[in-house]
Image (spheres, grey):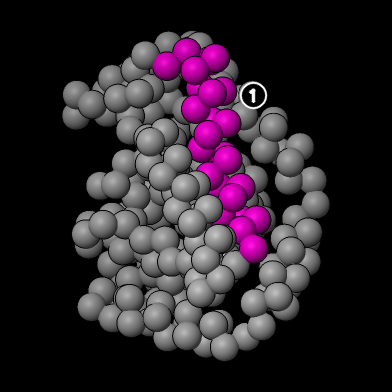
Amino acid sequence: MNALNVGVRKEIISALDLALADDKVRAVVLTGAGEKAFSAGADIKMFLTMNPFQAKKYLKISKGASAKLEKFPKPVIAAVNGYAIGGGLELAMSCDIVVASENAKFGQSEINVGAIPGVGGTQRLPRLIGLKRAKEMVFTGDLIDAQDAFRIGLVNKLAKQSELMATVESLVDKIAQKSPLILRLAKEALNRSSVGLDDGLNFESTLFAFCFSTKDQKEGAAAFLEKRKPVFVGE
């Protein structure tokens, strides 16, 4: 399910460094291996033993990868095949454009394992789909399908599963015809439209780390791994 651990996020950063150094690379496409998932999010096994200090360290690397995608000088396109949940959705939202297969599912589901979104979900999601819809997704942890994601502006384009990469390639070809320099300036200007994001992300980090001092977080992670319903006690 292409779980996002520290190693994977470091590899994303390394891949972007290589793409930046190669002038022949005009755009970057980020997708998940296989057809089941773009990414189902963090490896929940980590959450069983993670303390607040480890959570902050994890977030530093995770948010570093997301920030690099968001601020990368070349256009970045997420090709979402299957599930984009939790950190997977946060990763997709860090990309400039999201193209999804019709079988894609999206969710900010950290609440189900006793945590809140920690890699931009409480900040980027409401900026993309509005505060009310974002609150519903975060509070319930429910998944939405590709059609709903497209309707509310979380996804730019939809494609049949078999045509996903062809649709992305067509978009890349169109972008590649533009000036790399002007594209870089356009992206930088567009990114400045989100004022106050850094403060929001810092606040989110503090609350995310705090989750790992609670009983409910450990219960949520344990229940997920044991394939049972969690019993939250509000502590």
Asked which quadrant contains residue 104, the reply is bottom left
Residue 67 on the magenta span: yes
Asked which quadrant contains residue 223, the reply is top left
Q: Callout 1: helix, strand or loop?
A: helix
* Residue shown at the point (65%, 56%) measured from the top left: 71
Residue 62 on the magenta span: yes
Q: In this view, does 185 lie to the left or right of 175?
A: right
Residue 133 shows in this picture: no
* Residue shown at the point (66%, 83%) measured from the top left: 179
Please tell me which residue lies in front, 98 or 18.
Answer: 18
| Residue 119 versus residue 203 in the image, above or below | below
Q: Which amino acid does label 1 sit on?
A: Thr
Q: Is the magenta stretch mostly helix, strand or loop?
A: helix
Please tell me which residue lies in front, 165 or 221.
Answer: 165
* Residue shown at the point (80%, 52%) measured from the top left: 195
Q: Is residue 8 left or right of residue 130?
A: left
Residue 200 shows in this picture: yes
| Residue 189 versus residue 159 in the image, above or below | above
Residue 11 percent across, percent down from the top left: 41, 45
Residue 167 percent across, percent down from the top left: 38, 82
Residue bearing mark 1: 206
| Residue 203 versus residue 21 in the image, above or below | above
Q: How many marks?
A: 1
Mark 1 neighbour density, 10 Å: few (under 14) some (14–19) many (20 or more): some
Please tell me which residue lies in front, 93 or 183.
Answer: 183
Specify the segment rendered in magenta. 50-73
Q: Is residue 75 left or right of residue 87?
A: right
| Residue 29 versus residue 144 in the image, above or below | below
Q: Is residue 226 left or right of residue 42?
A: left
